[in-house]
Image (cartoon, coloured by chain):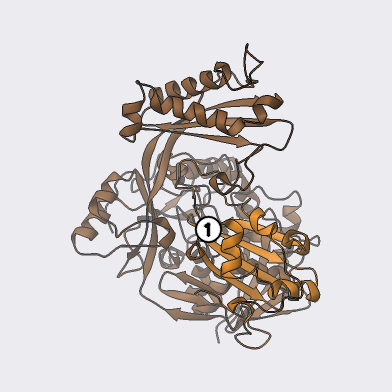
């Protein structure tokens, strides 16, 4: 009989609630064997992976109270970091972790796990005959080619539980990873201790968003669970929230295309026969099944699409509001027809799009309304072009046509709309696409992911991190 | 009755970059029964509400225990599209919410089919899988 494993879970890209110390204290009063939190994801879109930037979440600050408690109690922590989770993102978070450790006088021994996949490794796998199929029918992707790999700026994989387990086996104080499978972080210690994969996986699914699975849902709150051979009991660490059957079952739906079936590396988590019942302090789930399948990891790769510039106009003149869509469309057409832009449009180097806040900004082409119904509306001119210079020029051209160009029945001949922002054209950023969203088969779940054990705060960077590291 | 008025929670969110999933929770058995039997909460009904092809609708599911339904669609414009209007997919519920529940129509289409098992089974009536 394997001993139960107790997990304290939270989300490290969301700031903890004000009473987090009390929640952590409650969890440790029940007992904690590992503290786990996810901090990577694709939900923010491909920009972050392509640009090397990350949202200003300050993940090092968010984990501080949890790391303090874990170190004080001598239990390991497992965190993924950096949103897109490539080495450049992870390294920025690790520098924050260096500073956190230095400030607190901590010297933890940490396993650091990269989620980045080098282009050379992946191209080599494809050249060697690996079949890398699209992960989503909706992506429109074909089987991955070496050309796709070389076009990508960066590529990461959702690392499974096994590389985390390999680091936990080295008795580290914690594991910090780049891009990783959220539930895999939670699965690692229970699997290492010999609990069933199905229990580890369903626990991960219930805990991965922290207090969002509770009533009321709030990812700033922590969540606690105890896993055993047959199931998992989930509890709220806060007296202001509780686990209910409804909150827990509805969380199994959250951000998932299918309510009871989830494909993971090495198997499918099947909740079609799962049961949920309320206990004295929480909710217990039993009956999860795991159907083994070939081991694959999900790859995410970003390719540059161009540079974005935008301009914003606000309209309140009724005569113009009545024809806002055709007025904006006319400006798009004038850009596309202009001699200086037409060849760029034809070559696919320039695209312009207008969205009318007050008409079709949310649903776009699917919007059933054909006119503005309110008393004012905003128009966002959105240009994506091969270069920043071209994007800014085309955006300004569209702005000036809309600002000063004639429209049927015009009386506002000094200017057609309000311009709330100067510069009227705002250069936004490089634009990226998920050009890779594919499943990579791995014979060894440890895969090509660079792993190292280091004491923090580090002296300089980690030599195995960054750039095209070698396959292990 | 509008679906948006009948449901107590309607949450829309990405399920990966290329799908959007809409979870619906109902306040009581009676309202849930109307929703479960509606023509709106079928593959054909959802496709009509969004004015997309039925092949865009990945499925409609119900969970009798927690009075919930789930609708998943392929995204017509995802975060991959430079001009995607809703990167998190958090505001794509409104065409469905505006749909009418045909009260008294009874079970319509495959979505009204029975349970896959006893009360502990999460999803009855899998559609289009």
Q: In this view, does B64 lie to the left or right of A141?
A: right
Q: Is mark 1 on a helix, strand or loop?
A: loop
Chain B's colour is orange
Q: Position of residue A270 (x, y in %)?
A: 53, 78
Q: Position of residue A150 (x, y in %)?
A: 26, 46
Q: Compare residues A390 and A267 and report the one nearer the observer.
A: A390
Image quarter where the N terminus of chain A lies is: bottom right
Q: Compare residues A456 and A184 and report the one nearer the observer.
A: A184
At horizontal 51% and vertical 74% (from top left) the residue drawn is B128
Q: Position of residue A401 (x, y in %)?
A: 52, 20
Chain identifier, brown in the render: A
Q: Quadrant of residue A280?
A: bottom right
Q: In this view, does A34 lie to the left or right of A341?
A: right
Q: Where is residue A32 in the image (x, y as percent from the top left)?
A: 64, 67
Residue at mark 1: chain: B
According to the image, label 1 marks what residue?
B52
Query: In the displayed image of the protein, which residue is found farthest to the top?
Result: A414
Q: In this view, does A11 lie to the left or right of A344?
A: right
Numbered circles on residues, count:
1
Image quarter where the C terminus of chain A lies is: bottom left
Q: Is residue A217 left or right of residue A59?
A: right
Relative to residue A87, is residue A4 depicted above or below? below
Q: Is residue A255 visible?
A: no
Query: In the displayed image of the protein, which residue is found farthest to the front?
Result: A409
Q: Compare residues A46 and A170 and report the one nearer the observer.
A: A46
Q: Compare residues A204 and B27 and report the one nearer the observer.
A: B27
Q: Quadrant of residue A443?
A: bottom left
């Amino acid at each position: 009989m394997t001993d139960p494993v107790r997990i304290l879970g939270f989300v490290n890209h969301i700031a903890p609630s004000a009473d987090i110390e009390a929640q952590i204290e409650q969890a440790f009063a029940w007992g904690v064997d590992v503290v786990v939190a996810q901090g990577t994801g694709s939900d923010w879109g491909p920009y972050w992976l392509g640009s090397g930037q990350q949202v200003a979440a300050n993940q090092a600050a968010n984990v501080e109270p949890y790391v303090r408690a874990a170190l004080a109690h001598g239990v390991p922590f497992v965190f993924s970091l950096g949103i897109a989770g490539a080495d450049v993102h992870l390294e920025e978070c690790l520098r924050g972790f260096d500073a956190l450790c230095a400030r607190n006088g901590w010297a933890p021994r940490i396993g650091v796990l990269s989620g980045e996949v080098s282009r050379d490794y992946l191209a080599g796998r494809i050249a060697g005959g690996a079949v890398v199929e699209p992960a989503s029918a909706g992506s429109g992707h074909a089987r991955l080619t070496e050309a796709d790999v070389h076009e990508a700026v960066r590529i990461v994989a959702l690392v499974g539980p096994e590389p985390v387990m390999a680091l936990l086996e080295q008795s580290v104080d914690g594991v910090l990873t780049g891009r990783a499978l959220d539930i895999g972080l939670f699965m690692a210690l229970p699997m290492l201790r010999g609990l069933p994969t199905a229990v580890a996986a369903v626990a991960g699914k219930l805990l991965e968003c922290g207090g969002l699975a509770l009533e009321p849902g709030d990812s700033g709150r922590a969540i606690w669970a105890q896993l055993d051979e047959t199931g998992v009991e989930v509890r709220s660490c806060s007296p202001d929230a509780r686990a209910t059957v409804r909150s827990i079952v509805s969380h199994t739906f959250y951000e998932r295309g299918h309510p009871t079936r989830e494909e993971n590396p090495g198997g499918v988590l099947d909740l079609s026969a799962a049961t949920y019942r309320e206990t004295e302090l929480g909710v217990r789930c039993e009956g999860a099944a795991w159907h083994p399948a070939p081991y694959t990891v999900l790859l995410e790769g970003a390719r540059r699409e161009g540079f974005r510039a935008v301009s914003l106009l606000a309209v309140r003149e009724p005569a113009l509001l009545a024809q806002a869509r055709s007025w904006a469309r006319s400006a798009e057409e004038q850009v596309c027809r202009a001699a200086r832009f037409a060849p760029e449009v034809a070559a696919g180097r320039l695209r312009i799009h207008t969205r009318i806040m007050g008409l079709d900004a949310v649903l776009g082409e699917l919007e059933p309304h054909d006119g503005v119904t309110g008393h004012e509306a905003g128009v966002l001119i959105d240009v994506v072009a091969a270069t920043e210079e071209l994007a800014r020029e085309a955006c300004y051209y569209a702005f000036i046509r809309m600002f000063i160009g004639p429209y049927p029945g015009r009386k506002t001949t000094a200017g057609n709309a309000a311009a709330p922002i100067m510069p009227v054209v705002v250069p936004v950023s490089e634009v990226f696409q998920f050009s890779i969203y594919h499943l990579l088969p791995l014979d060894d779940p440890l895969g090509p992911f660079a792993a190292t054990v280091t004491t923090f705060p580090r002296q300089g960077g980690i030599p195995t991190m960054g750039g095209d590291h070698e396959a292990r | 009755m509008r679906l948006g008025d009948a449901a107590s929670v309607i949450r829309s969110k990405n399920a990966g970059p290329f799908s959007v999933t809409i979870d619906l929770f109902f306040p009581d058995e009676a309202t849930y029964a109307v929703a479960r039997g509606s023509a709106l909460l079928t593959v054909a009904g959802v496709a009509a509400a969004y004015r997309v092809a039925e092949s865009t609708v990945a499925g409609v599911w119900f969970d009798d225990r927690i009075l919930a339904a789930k609708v998943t669609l392929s995204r017509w414009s995802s975060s991959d599209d430079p001009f995607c209007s809703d990167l998190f997919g958090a505001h794509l519920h409104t065409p469905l919410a505006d749909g009418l529940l045909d009260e008294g129509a009874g079970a319509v289409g495959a979505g009204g089919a029975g349970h896959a098992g006893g009360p502990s089974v999460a999803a009855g009536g899998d559609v289009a899988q």
